[in-house]
Amino acid sequence: MKSYRELIEQTFEFPQKEFKVRDHELLFNDVPLMDIIKEYGTPLKLTYLPRISENIRYVQATFNNALERFKYNAKYTYCYCTKSSHFSFIMQEALKNKDVHMETSSSFDIPIVRALYEQGKLTKDTYILCNGFKMPLYRQYISELLNDDFNNCIPILDNLGEIDFYEENVKVPYKVGIRVAADEEPKFEFYTSRLGIRYSDINSFYKERIEKSDKASLKMLHFFINTGIKDTAYYWSELSRFIFKYCELKKICDSLDSIDIGGGFPIKTSLTFHYDYKYMIEQIVENIKWICDKNNVPVPNIFTEFGSYTVGESGAVLYSLVDQKLQNDKELWYMINGSFITHLPDAWGLNQKYILLALNKWDDPYHKVNIGGLTCDSMDYYNSEAHTGEVFLPMITDEEPLYIGFFHTGAYQESLGGYGGIQHCLIPAPKHVLIDRDEDGVITTQLFAPEQTSESMLRVLGYGK
């Protein structure tokens, strides 16, 4: 029987940039994962911080090269979408890069902005794009930022009445954006997004509420579609429609000089993944310029707000296989010392597939398995990959334990899983380790958080002090 290594090498182009094998064991971004396990144990979440900066710098360079290539006479600005991961180490890694800004979606994002400002991680000139449907506290916090001279805090108006609060409570001149309610993909359950202001209302809203204001000025139009940035007729049609609306509004609004095309770059969730980021960026820039030139208006500054793309590929979750159970003639279960429902909720709730690889035993034979989590829920399992309807892992035939890893899990999983709170069957949040490299390329690790304790759960549930 072939070894697990032969299976992977024959199925995929392998090794790949992030994944290599040395002495039967997997390296993730050249980090020997078995060394991490020997030091910290499992279950374990890890974040490889340098990948965040690598992805940011790549997109910045690619956009700027495209602007130069097409003689696009405006600027590109990279914003990090905070809801993908609010952790301090993520924010600090992102903001240490030149010309990185923030997009928020919640009232509690604003105290994070304040904390980062106090730490010197951002300035009052950092762009803070405030998105989402805004409850009173969110609008209050935005107004306080504006009154405190955060000059580039821009509330992105999500409905016609939102500006009333700022007109009443903001005491200084301020800039606003308008989110355009894009049409959803044809197969979606709804025709138009619930978020934003519909196309037919935008011009009249500007003339009646913003143009007549003594304080507000329109700087930006915002656009986002749920399916992300894909090379499809639907995406290009919606983007073009949005740019035509920008051109129409620009002719009556001199202060409008920017567009935000949202996020939506995909991340690698399979070893078969291929996406031409350079091509898509160049096509976006070229299409915007062509439409603006056709309408004789200046091209806008381009903002993006990448979240999953920024942090997703930095994350991994590592498990030990604690038992194997043959439940009938052909269904073999590997039981992990964790839970998909609580640790990787997208795998359960959205049937999201991640890159799954063994961490050791690469030269051992393999077989088909199902992987089961610790909760009592029948849905706590993982039994197929993005490229196939099956999962193959090395056999467990000796005393050496088998360890496995799910990779590129860095976006959303902690917040969706209820980090630090109460999760299904009281499965504790695993320990979290940060991995970095110093200036000489030497790997450093730091325990960000230990495994959640029963005492912390009891306090949440009202049993402890």
Image: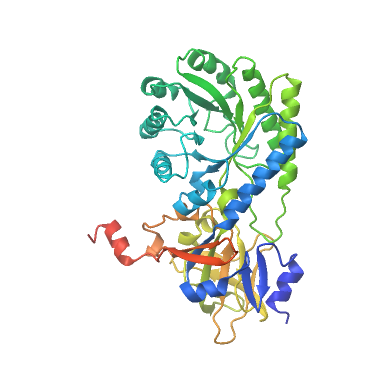
Residue 180 in view in this figure: no
What residue is rendered at 74% in x and 70% in y? Answer: 9
- In which image quadrant can residue 68 be found? top right
Q: Is residue 141 above or below residue 401?
A: above
Q: In this view, does 341 lie to the left or right of 262?
A: left
What residue is rendered at 52% in x and 32% in y? Answer: 195
What residue is rendered at 59% in x and 85% in y? Answer: 397
Q: Is residue 319 above or below residue 73?
A: below
Residue 165 in view in this figure: yes
Q: Is residue 22 left or right of residue 116?
A: right
Front residue of 439 and 453:
439
Which quadrant would the C terminus be assigned to in this image? bottom left
Across and down, in percent, residue 14 comes to 73, 67
What residue is rendered at 69% in x and 20% in y? Answer: 297
Q: Residue furthest front?
A: 440
Front residue of 224 and 327:
224
Front residue of 314 and 334:
314
Across and down, in percent, residue 80 comes to 54, 43
Front residue of 130 and 223:
130
Which quadrant would the N terminus be assigned to in this image? bottom right
Q: Residue furthest bottom?
A: 398
- In which image quadrant can residue 257 be found? top right
Across and down, in percent, residue 122 comes to 47, 41
